[in-house]
């Protein structure tokens, strides 16, 4: 199974969208997840082992870039598209499923993290509630061991004790 996730550009929005990646990978562990995301948020996911590919949206700037994007999606042949940007890509790939991408998230879901999870659940065809408990346990943002060691080194240098982190 191939899943294309069209992510957001801003780092904060990408962090709030990250649990949806974890949710998709938890549901389909063997799936090849491709993340199409803005240049600013690309470093957050560049070394994430859950993702088969991380592609910058900036590679598809301009009108000819958008046409190349549609051709790229056709060559990728994803089984599902999760579009957090609400682009027209779902209409270009499988229009009979596109309604999931444009159906509004209920107003009772206020926090953006929950809204992104609800949007992902609908577009992935997962039914049920959209509560926080539905999100997989663990880290939504993957942090590699070298990065963990670098952060621990900084915290030690600044005198932050392990129990105070």
Image (cartoon, grey):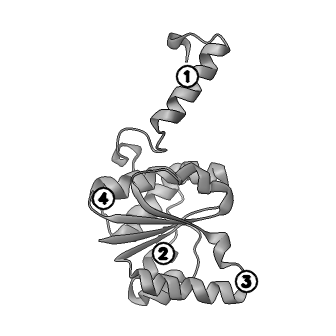
Q: CA distance from mark 3 to mark 4?
A: 39 Å
Q: Which residue is mark 3?
A: 62
Badge 3 density bin: few <14, some 14–19, many ≥20, Cα 10 Å: few
Check the image and report above or below for 6 versus 76: above
> On the rendered image, what quadrant is the C terminus found in?
top right
Q: Quadrant of residue 88?
A: bottom right
Residue 65, image x, y percentages:
66, 84
Q: Which residue is mark 2?
A: 101
Residue 47, image x, y percentages:
49, 50
Q: CA distance from mark 2 to mark 4?
A: 17 Å
Q: Please give the name of the residue rendered at 50% of the width and 11% of the height, measured from the top-left corner.
A: 163
Please, what secondary structure does the residue beneath circle 2 have?
A: helix
Q: Earlier in the sequence, mark 3 or mark 4?
A: 3
Mark 1 and mark 4 in contact (Cβ < 8 Å)?
no
Badge 1 density bin: few <14, some 14–19, many ≥20, Cα 10 Å: some
- The image's mark for residue 128 is 4
Q: Which residue is mark 1?
A: 152
Q: Which of 4/58 is in front? A: 58
Q: Please give the name of the residue rendered at 35% of the width and 45% of the height, measured from the top-left corner.
A: 136
Check the image and report above or below for 23 versus 84: above
Q: Earlier in the sequence, mark 4 or mark 1?
A: 4
Mark 2 and mark 3 in contact (Cβ < 8 Å)?
no
Q: Residue furthest right?
A: 62
Please, what secondary structure does the residue beneath circle 3 have?
A: helix
């Amino acid at each position: 199974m191939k899943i294309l996730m069209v992510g957001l550009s801003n780092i904060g929005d990408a962090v709030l969208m990250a649990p949806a990646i974890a949710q998709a990978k938890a549901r389909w562990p063997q799936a090849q997840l491709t993340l199409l995301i803005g240049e600013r948020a690309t470093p957050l996911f560049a070394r994430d082992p859950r993702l088969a590919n991380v592609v910058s949206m900036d590679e598809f700037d301009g009108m000819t870039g958008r046409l190349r994007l549609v051709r790229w999606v056709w060559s990728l042949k994803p089984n599902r598209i999760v579009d957090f940007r609400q682009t027209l890509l779902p209409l270009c790939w499988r229009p009979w499923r596109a309604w999931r991408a444009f159906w509004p998230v209920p107003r009772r879901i206020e926090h953006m993290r929950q809204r992104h999870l609800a949007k992902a659940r609908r577009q992935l065809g997962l039914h049920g509630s959209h509560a926080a408990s539905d999100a997989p346990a663990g880290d939504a943002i993957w942090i590699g061991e070298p990065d963990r060691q670098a952060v621990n080194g900084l915290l030690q240098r600044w005198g932050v004790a392990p129990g105070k982190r």
